[in-house]
Amino acid sequence: MSRLPPPQESTVNKGHGRVENRQIWVSSDLAGYLDFPHCQQVFRIERTVTKLDGTPMRHEVVFGVTSLRAAEGSPRRLLELNRGHWGIENRLHWVRDVTFDEDRSQVRKGAGAQAMAALRNLTIGLLRRAGATNIAAALRHCIQHAEKTLRLIGL
């Protein structure tokens, strides 16, 4: 088995009672060989999560492709984007699932599910744009103050 060269970038984050170490290896060597539209670089991210006392919790290896050229997508930038992606992903989906109880929605046929998801996303976006940090509390406020809600959407 071949050994990897040292990672091109690594980060260590502490929080929530754990330590997360991320390492990335990036290459543009495969860009012309992959049958993947707009592929400029491929990367490997290795994540190791341990408890603060050093007890291992999780080890993951993920692979990805990006349309960013090396000048736009340095190893550090790709690590930042990857970490930020999951923060956004978790933030949006958690709100949709918990606040709107999306998993129990009965709308499943045709374009209805997509339309409802778009309306939920629009609602979350409008509330965040208006300064809301707690979407559930903002929704309760909107229910109690219909005139403010209508002004929020320009009516």
Image (tube, rainbow, N blue to C red):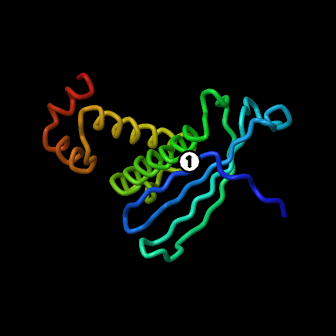
Q: Nearer the viewer, residue 134 or 63?
A: 63
Q: Residue at x 71, y 36 (%)?
A: 41
Where does residue 88 sit, x and y in percent of width and height? 44, 45
Q: Residue at x 42, y 71 (%)?
A: 52
What is the residue that sits farthest to the top in this orientation?
154
Where does residue 132 sit, x and y in percent of width and height? 24, 40
Q: Nearer the viewer, residue 111 or 83?
A: 83
**Callout 1: SS:** loop
Q: Residue at x 28, y 46 (%)?
A: 135
Where does residue 79 sit, x and y in percent of width and height? 55, 45
Q: Nearer the viewer, residue 122 or 66?
A: 66
Task: Report the side of 110 relative to 67 (left or right).
Answer: left
Task: Report the side of 63 relative to 12 (left or right).
Answer: right
104 w.r.t. 108: above or below: below
Task: Report the side of 66 relative to 117 (left or right).
Answer: right
Q: Residues within 10 Å of mark 1 (few under 14, many from 20)?
A: few
89 w.r.t. 53: above or below: above
Where does residue 23 sit, x and y in percent of width and height? 60, 53
Q: Residue 26, located in which quarter of the rendered image?
A: top right
> Dividing the image into 4 quarters, which one contains the N terminus?
bottom right
- In this rendering, the count of numbered labels is 1
Q: Find disc 1 in the rendering and name its residue.
A: 109
Q: Residue 36, located in which quarter of the rendered image?
A: top right
What is the residue that sits farthest to the front in this orientation?
6
Q: Residue at x 49, y 49 (%)?
A: 86
> Dividing the image into 4 quarters, which one contains the C terminus?
top left
The kind of residue tagged 1 is Lys
Q: Nearer the viewer, residue 97 or 59?
A: 59
